[in-house]
């Protein structure tokens, strides 16, 4: 749960998105919203919408997912199914690609709490992909250089320490098949649902293998094609990147935090100070 979308990354952007969907009803309402949004902002290209449900044991939720299957939407239909809950979103990406890779030439991966908010979002990203030399992935949320303290954990180096947030974005069957030919699946944590390891093996792993295969990651920096669903529901304006003032204020705070966090005592009083100032 995260109430507000916050600044994160290098370069800094509003990438730590708000999320507050904690019940079955919340999730069903979210999916219904996403389907309605598809009517408001059509993709611009014929496509099908694949909804992958990672089974958490909700009979109501699983039944809802089953009912969505084969429902017609503009420029396509919904394909929905339930799978074992392994690897979080990244496991779902892999599962869907392996199931349907012979049916589609391109795949757009989006997490369940992110929604598309621009007409022709798919056409725009598809055209960008075709125009980008040796393109491997179009990041929808944003790209970030990965901090060095993650390099050892994720097997990164100076050449491949770049990541597409949430693994959200567009890639081709050609590129994704290259990944499967190399490791057998799209990167995800295959052992459990540990969030940190899922990010390492999923979000970071997907970008890493695309770069290692010799393809380029890029983004639509001046296009907002997606936004946090929770912000949209509350009518909160969204932009990818902060103003000059907010950017450098965040950088200064980060530098101070990194220094203070070396001492547990100083960190304790620093966090208390921030809490007091917020009040």
Image (cartoon, helix red, strand yellow):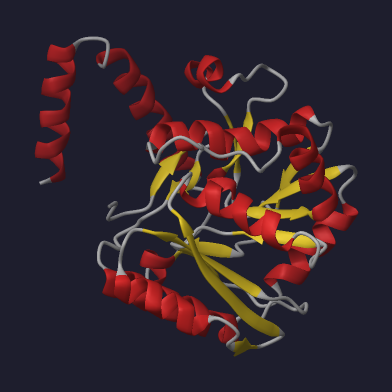
Residue 236: quarter of image: bottom left
Q: Is residue 27 visible?
A: yes
Q: Is residue 199 above or below residue 46?
A: above
Q: Is residue 121 above or below residue 17?
A: below
Q: Is residue 271 above or below residue 125?
A: above
For image coordinates 46% across by 48% down, the residue present is: 88
At which x and y percent is residue 43?
69, 76
Q: Is residue 234 visible?
A: no
**How many discs appear?**
0
For image coordinates 60% across by 84% down, the residue present is: 70
At which x and y percent is residue 122?
72, 69
For image coordinates 60% across by 62% down, the residue present is: 224
At which x and y percent is residue 215?
82, 37
For image coordinates 53% across by 69% down, the residue present is: 81
7 displayed left or right of 239: left
At which x and y percent is residue 216?
80, 38
43 displayed left or right of 104: left
């Amino acid at each position: 749960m995260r109430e507000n979308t916050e600044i994160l990354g290098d370069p800094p952007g509003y990438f730590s998105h708000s999320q507050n969907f904690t019940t079955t009803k919340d999730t069903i309402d979210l999916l219904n919203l996403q389907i309605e949004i598809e009517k408001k902002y059509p993709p611009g290209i014929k496509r099908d919408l694949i909804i992958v449900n990672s089974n958490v044991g909700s009979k109501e939720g699983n039944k809802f997912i089953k009912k969505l299957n084969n429902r017609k939407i503009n420029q396509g239909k919904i394909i929905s199914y339930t799978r074992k809950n392994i690897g979080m979103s990244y496991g779902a990406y892999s599962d869907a690609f392996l199931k349907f890779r012979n049916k589609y030439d391109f795949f757009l991966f989006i997490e369940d709490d992110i929604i598309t908010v621009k007409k022709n979002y798919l056409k725009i990203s598809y055209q960008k992909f075709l125009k980008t030399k040796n393109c491997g992935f179009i990041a929808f949320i944003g790209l970030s250089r990965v901090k060095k303290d993650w390099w050892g954990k994720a097997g990164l180096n100076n050449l491949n320490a770049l990541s597409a947030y949430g693994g959200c974005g567009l890639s081709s069957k050609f590129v994704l098949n290259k990944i499967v030919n190399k490791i057998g699946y799209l990167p995800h944590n295959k052992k459990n649902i540990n969030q940190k390891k899922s990010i390492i093996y999923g979000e970071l792993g997907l970008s890493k293998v695309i770069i290692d295969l010799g393809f380029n990651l890029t983004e639509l920096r001046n296009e907002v094609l997606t936004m946090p669903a929770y912000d949209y529901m509350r009518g909160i304006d969204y932009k990818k990147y902060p103003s000059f003032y907010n950017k450098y204020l965040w950088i200064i705070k980060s530098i101070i935090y990194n220094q203070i966090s070396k001492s547990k005592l100083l960190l304790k009083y620093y966090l208390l100070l921030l809490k007091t100032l917020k009040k």
